[in-house]
């Protein structure tokens, strides 16, 4: 077995794993080494965390590592901008953790590392077939590998073991840091009992209600003065990070007549091969642009109304075994082959395959568009954005204010590079050229807005909608006031509802943590249901969805004898939740107060 492990295939596989994963440990375990290099220039550093530098070389290696891992997981074309953002957050987090480990003097012994490495090896180790028996990780094989003296005489095998141990060391350090932060979290018997009750005590109710959405807008008009007052009272709710507003030119990647002609020529060529007797499924696998291509163009059975009309008309005009002439749809050019049919008349279905050639911009078209935009960017940098617009007779648009990482239609969430660069610039600055599937874009900085509450004119629609909903809830509650009056005279919920032509709803019994259809969860309705006694009817209850009157028909009390048997599982759930909340709050505070310098915008645009 050990001889097999030292085969060329094994060594290659192990070295790839080590190379891919090794970089990830540099920040966490050895990150402090970078800060001692004394590089202050932006050209040497991607940024820093509390004064500890993150070198460009280190970060680029991390990005390549994450790209390789994404491809290894089956994503052959990962979005680089997303990887850059994820890598940055991971590096920052690892660096912060490393600093805290050093601050608290957390350490692990070699014996602890050896124990964890042997008993809880990393997932990437367990997945290697050389350490498996019948597809399952075999600890005996791994330990035999670790105990064999000749393992350490091979430099590559020795490096593998050293990395596995460093991986275990990092795991232990992280666990000890977490234990230090959340180790004092306890769960009392009273908390356990309350959690058990919340999960298991149920009520059955009957209710009538008015949905706020059913109230006409005309009955919930909101005055500007109300909006202004609400905004002044809740300004802190509308705080956002620093933002920029930009003008931009966007040139869509539109196919030309030449591209159309090339697509038509390609479909004609494929059609000729199909008519000549070449295997249709193989042609689809080789040439089709559609998602069905790898399946040989197989679309299965479909009836009328399932496909776009030109495609449907062509498919249903064919007999089994026949191939259509090229057909144009909004998706491109198709050649269709019907394999078989079933049914008749309105129930007729065809089993078809197709080959799709999309009409999309070719290399020459894209190159021409790139040259156009790059020339425009150069002119804009020279004479100004607006002057360049006039020179080239182009149309510009306004981005409105956007913050780093926020969604913007042209760039999706990959806005951090653009925003961070402009936040350090001056109005009139021109961006680099951005390119994605939708088009090619250039931005010009118009305005910078410092962090703080968003202006009223931006949040006015949001405030108006919120106030309108609250008014509708009040209108709904008012409509139930008369119903409540009938109930207080002694009428039952059903009689009062019938008098006003309302329907009594009877949902399934629910717990405090449950969800009531059309009502929601963890709101005033649920709270009232558990406060009332059996047979008792509530006053009018308001939630953010509407207004209700409810009656408790049954309270399904909890059999506390079941608490003992569920205690251990419940304890783990509750303490895990409390620890997670404590650790999350601790890290959020750590991150908020960290001095994080981010220079990524000098090196990347798409993130």
Image (cartoon, rainbow, N blue to C red):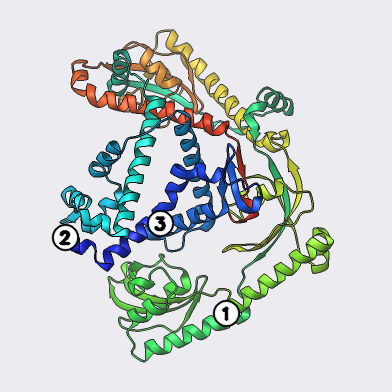
User: Which is in the foreground here, disc 1 or disc 2?
Assistant: 2
Vertical position of residue 114 compared to residue 229: above or below: below
The answer to whether residue 54 shows anywhere in this view is: yes
Callout 3: 10 Å neighbours few (<14), some, many (20+)? Answer: some
Q: Is there a contact, CB below 8 Å, between mark 2 and mark 3? A: no
Nearest the viewer among 496 and 114 is 114
Indicate left or right for 374 with 513 as reference: right
Nearest the viewer among 353 and 488 is 353
- Give the percent coordinates (x, y) of residue 275: 38, 89
Residues 164 and 281: in front is: 164
The location of residue 176, given as percent across then percent down, is 37, 31
Query: Secondary structure beneath disc 2?
Result: loop
Quarter assignment of residue 374: bottom right
Q: Of the residues under marks 1 and 3, which one precedes in the sequence?
A: 3
Q: Is residue 443 left or right of residue 75?
A: right
Q: CA distance from mark 1 to mark 2?
A: 59 Å
Instruction: Name the N-terminal-most of marks 2 and 3.
Output: 2
Residues 607 and 565: in front is 607
Q: Residue furthest bottom?
A: 276
Left or right: where 493 falls relative to 417: left
Q: Which residue is label 3 attached to?
A: 20
Residue on which disc 1 sits: 260
Q: Which residue bears the numbered disc 2?
A: 1
């Amino acid at each position: 077995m050990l001889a097999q492990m030292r085969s060329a295939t094994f060594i290659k596989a192990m070295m790839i794993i080590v190379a891919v994963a090794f970089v990830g440990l540099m920040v966490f375990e050895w990150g402090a080494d970078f800060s001692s290099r004394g590089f202050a220039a932006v050209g040497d550093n991607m940024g820093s965390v509390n004064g500890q530098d993150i070198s460009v070389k280190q970060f680029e290696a991390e990005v390549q590592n994450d790209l390789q891992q994404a491809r290894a997981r089956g994503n052959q074309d990962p979005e680089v901008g997303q990887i850059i953002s994820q890598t940055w957050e991971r590096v920052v987090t690892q660096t912060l953790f490393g600093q805290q480990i050093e601050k608290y003097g957390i350490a692990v012994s070699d014996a602890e590392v050896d124990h964890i490495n042997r008993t809880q090896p990393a997932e990437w180790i367990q997945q290697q077939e050389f350490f498996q028996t019948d597809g399952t990780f075999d600890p005996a094989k791994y330990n035999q590998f670790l105990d064999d003296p000749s393992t350490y005489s091979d430099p590559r095998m020795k490096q593998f073991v050293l990395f596995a141990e460093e991986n275990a060391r990092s795991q232990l350090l992280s666990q000890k840091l977490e234990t230090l932060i959340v180790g004092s979290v306890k769960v009392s018997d009273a908390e356990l009992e309350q959690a058990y009750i919340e999960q298991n005590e149920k009520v059955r109710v009957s209710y009538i209600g008015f949905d706020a959405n059913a109230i006409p807008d005309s009955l919930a008009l909101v005055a500007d003065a109300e909006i202004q007052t609400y905004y002044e009272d809740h300004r802190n709710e509308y705080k956002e990070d620093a933002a920029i507003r930009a003008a931009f030119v966007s040139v869509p990647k539109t196919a030309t007549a030449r591209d159309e002609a090339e697509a038509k020529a390609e479909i004609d060529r494929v059609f000729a091969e199909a008519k000549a007797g070449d295997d249709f499924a193989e042609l689809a696998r080789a040439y089709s642009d559609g998602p069905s291509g790898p399946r040989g163009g197989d679309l299965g059975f479909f009836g009328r109304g399932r496909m776009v009309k030109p495609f449907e008309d062509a498919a249903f005009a064919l007999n089994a075994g026949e191939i259509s002439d090229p057909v144009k749809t909004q998706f491109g050019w198709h050649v269709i082959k019907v394999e078989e049919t079933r049914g008749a008349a309105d129930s007729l279905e065809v089993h078809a395959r197709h080959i799709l050639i999309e009409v999309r911009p070719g290399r020459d078209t894209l190159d021409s568009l790139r040259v156009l935009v790059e020339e425009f960017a150069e002119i804009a940098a020279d004479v100004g954005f607006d002057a360049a617009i006039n020179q080239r007779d182009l149309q510009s648009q306004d981005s409105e204010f956007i913050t780093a990482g926020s969604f913007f239609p042209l760039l999706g969430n990959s806005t951090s590079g653009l925003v961070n660069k402009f936040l350090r610039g001056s109005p009139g600055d021109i961006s680099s050229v951005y390119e994605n599937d939708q088009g090619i874009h250039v931005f010009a900085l118009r305005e910078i807005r410092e962090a703080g509450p968003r202006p009223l004119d931006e949040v006015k629609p949001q405030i108006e909608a919120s106030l309108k909903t609250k008014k509708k809830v009040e209108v709904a509650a008012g409509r139930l006031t008369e119903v409540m009056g009938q109930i207080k005279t002694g009428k039952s919920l059903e009689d009062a509802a019938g008098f006003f032509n309302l329907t009594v709803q009877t949902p399934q019994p629910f717990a405090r943590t449950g969800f009531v259809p059309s009502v929601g969860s963890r709101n005033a309705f649920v709270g009232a249901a558990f406060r009332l006694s059996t047979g008792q009817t509530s006053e009018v209850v308001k939630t953010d969805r509407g207004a209700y009157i409810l009656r408790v028909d049954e309270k399904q009390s909890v059999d506390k004898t079941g608490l003992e048997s569920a205690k251990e599982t419940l304890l783990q759930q509750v303490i895990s939740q409390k620890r997670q909340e404590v650790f999350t709050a601790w890290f959020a505070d750590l991150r908020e107060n960290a001095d994080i310098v981010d220079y990524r915008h000098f090196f990347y645009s798409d993130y």
